[in-house]
Image: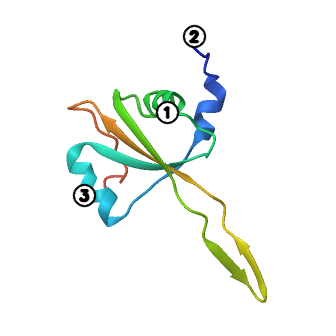
Amino acid sequence: MSKVIDQRRLADLIIKPIVTEKATLQLEDNKYVFDVRPEATKPEIKAAIELLFDVKVTGVNTARMPRRKKRVGRFMGFKAQVKRAVVTLKEGDSIQLFPDV
């Protein structure tokens, strides 16, 4: 049973790319890390990356990051929970995260 993926919704699934030391080291293995919406599924993430960046995705790994405590004055709350997606691209494909300067 295949689920039809709404093309208009795909662009909203990807929140932002993650640029950390660990994520930058994974670029050598052709892996890119993105924050995605918590309700996004692996097939939707794959379709969104392929549509937005015109690349071929070979694998998607996801992880739900824990909520972090946030204090504002005397009130304690939580930051929104996010989901991280590590996207592996086909050999030879790449995503340009940093514009040429």
Return the disc, 1 or 2, that comes first in the chain's sequence: 2
Return the disc, 1 or 3, that comes first in the chain's sequence: 3
User: Which secondary structure lies at badge 3?
Assistant: helix
Mark linked to residue 25? 3
Name which residue lies at 64% across and 75% down. 69
Q: Which is more foreground, mark 1 or mark 2?
A: 2
Task: Determine which quarter of the picture holds residue 54.
Answer: top left
Work out whether residue 49 or residue 82 is closer to the camera in this orientation and state it. 82
> Crowding near pointer 2: few (<14 within 10 Å), some, many (20+)?
few
Q: Which is more foreground, mark 2 or mark 3?
A: 2
Looking at the picture, which amino acid does disc 2 mark? Met
Q: Which is more foreground, mark 1 or mark 3?
A: 1
Looking at the picture, which amino acid does disc 1 mark? Lys
> Crowding near pointer 1: few (<14 within 10 Å), some, many (20+)?
some
Residues at discs 1 and 2 in contact (Cβ within 8 Å): no
| Rendering coords of residue 70 (x, y %) | 67, 76
User: What colour-coding does the image apply?
Assistant: rainbow
Mark linked to residue 42? 1
Return the disc, 2 or 3, that comes first in the chain's sequence: 2
| Rendering coords of residue 10 (x, y %) | 59, 32
Task: State the separation of the CA atoms marked 1 and 2.
Answer: 16 Å
Q: Is residue 21 left or right of residue 42?
A: left
